[in-house]
Image (spheres, rainbow, N blue to C red):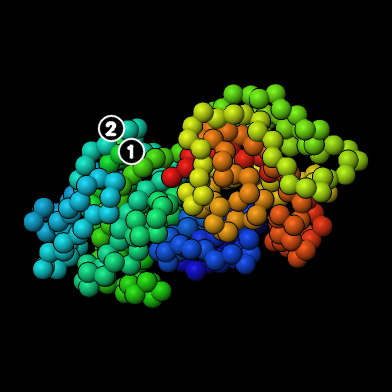
C-alpha cells in the first residue's frame, strides 16, 4: 500500500497525490484515502487494458451474506455523516455489502471512478479511522481490478444515490498484514458506510458548447475518441503570463474554492511539444481539491469560477507551475511553460 505512483509523472512520489500537485503541497487528506489512492493508481497503470472487463476480479457483492442481527446499526440522514453502532459480538467472517438506502441514479459499473462520502471504523475497537465528512468533501475511488477490493466488490452494481454498508474482513481490506499507519491489524474487520454521489466512465468528457475562442496560443483539436490534441505553434515563444481560454462553455454549477474537482486533462510541454501526462491515456478521470494549495498555482488560480461541463486551455509559465526547480519526474525544467487542456466534469 506504500508503493510510489510512478504512473503519474506530475505527482509527488508519496501515495495519494494528485495530477498537477505541487511537490511541496500537503495532501490535506485522510490516511485511508492516501493509501487507497496510491493502490488505485498502480492498479490503473497495471490493468488499463482490462478495466472494462471483470476478468481477474471478485464478482461484486449485491447483498448481505450474513444475518441482519450480526450487522452494525446505522442511523442518520442520507447525505450527512452517519452514526454506526457495532454489535457486541464477533464480526462475521464473510464480506457483505448491504444497501441501506436505494438510490435512483444509474448503476455503478466496473472501471468507473466513483465519487463517494464515507465513514470507516474498525469493528473490534470502534475506532473511526477516516471520514470524508470530517474532511469536508467526498473523494474519488477507481473501481478497477487491483484497487481496494472492498470498494470494487461492494460498490459495483449499486445505484448512484445509494447508501451502502460494507462489512470488510481482512481479505477484502488490507490483508493479513493490516495497515499500521491506520492502526489496523491483520485480523481487523472494517466497517464502511458509503454514500455514492456520482460515477464517471473513463471516456467522460466536457459537455459544454463551443465558444469560438482563439488566443493565438496553442491549437486544440479533437482527436480520436474525443481526446483533445494540443499543437504548439512552430517557433512561437511561450507567453510569460498565465492565460485561460474557455474552449467549451459548460452550463453546470460554478466551481468554488475547496471543492473536490473531477477532471480529464492532458498536459503538454510548450518547449518540446510533448505530452507529459494525461488522464485520458489512463481511461480514468482525476480528482483533487481546488483553490486550497493542493495543486500548482496555475490550476488554483484559473479553475475556481469555471462552470462544470467546461473545457479550458491553460498556458502556465514556470512561476505558476513548478517554479524554478521544475518537475524531473515529468521531464519539466525550471524554464518550461506548460499547456493543459482540462475538462471539468464535476465539483463536490
In the image, residue 106 above or below residue 66: above
Q: Which residue is drawn at 26% across and 70% down?
A: 127
Q: What element carries label 2?
A: loop
The image quadrant of residue 213 is top right
What is the residue that sits farthest to the right in this orientation? Answer: 235
What is the residue that sits farthest to the left in this orientation? Answer: 69
Residue that label 2 marks: 104
Q: Is mark 1 on a helix, strand or loop?
A: loop
Say if residue 10 shows up in the picture. Answer: yes
In the image, residue 243 above or below residue 184: above
Within 10 angstroms of label 1, few (less than 14), some, or many (20 or more) residues?
many
Q: In the rendered structure, are the residues bearing label 1 and label 2 in contact, judged by CB atoms less than 8 Å apart?
A: yes
Q: Residue at x 48, y 63 (%)?
A: 28
The image quadrant of residue 218 is top right
Residue that label 1 marks: 160
Q: Position of residue 118 (x, y in %)?
A: 32, 54
Instruction: Say whether residue 295 is left or right of residue 58.
Output: right
Instruction: Say whether residue 268 is left or right of residue 197.
Output: right
Instruction: Say whether residue 195 is left or right of residue 329.
Output: left
Amino acid at each position: 500500500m506504500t508503493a510510489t505512483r510512478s504512473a503519474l509523472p506530475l505527482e509527488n512520489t508519496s501515495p495519494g497525490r494528485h495530477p498537477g500537485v505541487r511537490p511541496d503541497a500537503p495532501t490535506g487528506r485522510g490516511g485511508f484515502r492516501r493509501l487507497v489512492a496510491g493502490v488505485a493508481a498502480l492498479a490503473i497503470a497495471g490493468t488499463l487494458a482490462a478495466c472494462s472487463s471483470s476478468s481477474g476480479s471478485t464478482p461484486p457483492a449485491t447483498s448481505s451474506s450474513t444475518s441482519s442481527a450480526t450487522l452494525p446499526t446505522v442511523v442518520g440522514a442520507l447525505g450527512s455523516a452517519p452514526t454506526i453502532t457495532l454489535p457486541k459480538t464477533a464480526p462475521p467472517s464473510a464480506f457483505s455489502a448491504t444497501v441501506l438506502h436505494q438510490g435512483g441514479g444509474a448503476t455503478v459499473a466496473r472501471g468507473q471512478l466513483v465519487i463517494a462520502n464515507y465513514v470507516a471504523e474498525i469493528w473490534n475497537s470502534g475506532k473511526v479511522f477516516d471520514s470524508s465528512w470530517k474532511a469536508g468533501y467526498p473523494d474519488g475511488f477507481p473501481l478497477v481490478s487491483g484497487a481496494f477490493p472492498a470498494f470494487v466488490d461492494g460498490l459495483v452494481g449499486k445505484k448512484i444515490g445509494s447508501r451502502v454498508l460494507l462489512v470488510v474482513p481482512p481479505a477484502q481490506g488490507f490483508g493479513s498484514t493490516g495497515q499500521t499507519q491506520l492502526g489496523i491489524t491483520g485480523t481487523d474487520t472494517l466497517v464502511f458506510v458509503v454514500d455514492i454521489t456520482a460515477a464517471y466512465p473513463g471516456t467522460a468528457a466536457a459537455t459544454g458548447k463551443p465558444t469560438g475562442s482563439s488566443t493565438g496560443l496553442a491549437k486544440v483539436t479533437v482527436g480520436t475518441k474525443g481526446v483533445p490534441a494540443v499543437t504548439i505553434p512552430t517557433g512561437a515563444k511561450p507567453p510569460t503570463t498565465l492565460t485561460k481560454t474557455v474552449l467549451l462553455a459548460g452550463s453546470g454549477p460554478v466551481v468554488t474554492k475547496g471543492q473536490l474537482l473531477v477532471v480529464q486533462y492532458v498536459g503538454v510541454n510548450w518547449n518540446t511539444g510533448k505530452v507529459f501526462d494525461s488522464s485520458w491515456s489512463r481511461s480514468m478521470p482525476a480528482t483533487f481539491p481546488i483553490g486550497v494549495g493542493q495543486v500548482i498555482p496555475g490550476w488554483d488560480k484559473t479553475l475556481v469560477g469555471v462552470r462544470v461541463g467546461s473545457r479550458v486551455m491553460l498556458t502556465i509559465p514556470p512561476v505558476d507551475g513548478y517554479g524554478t526547480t521544475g518537475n524531473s519526474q515529468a521531464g519539466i525544467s525550471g524554464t518550461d511553460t506548460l499547456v493543459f487542456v482540462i475538462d471539468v466534469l464535476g465539483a463536490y
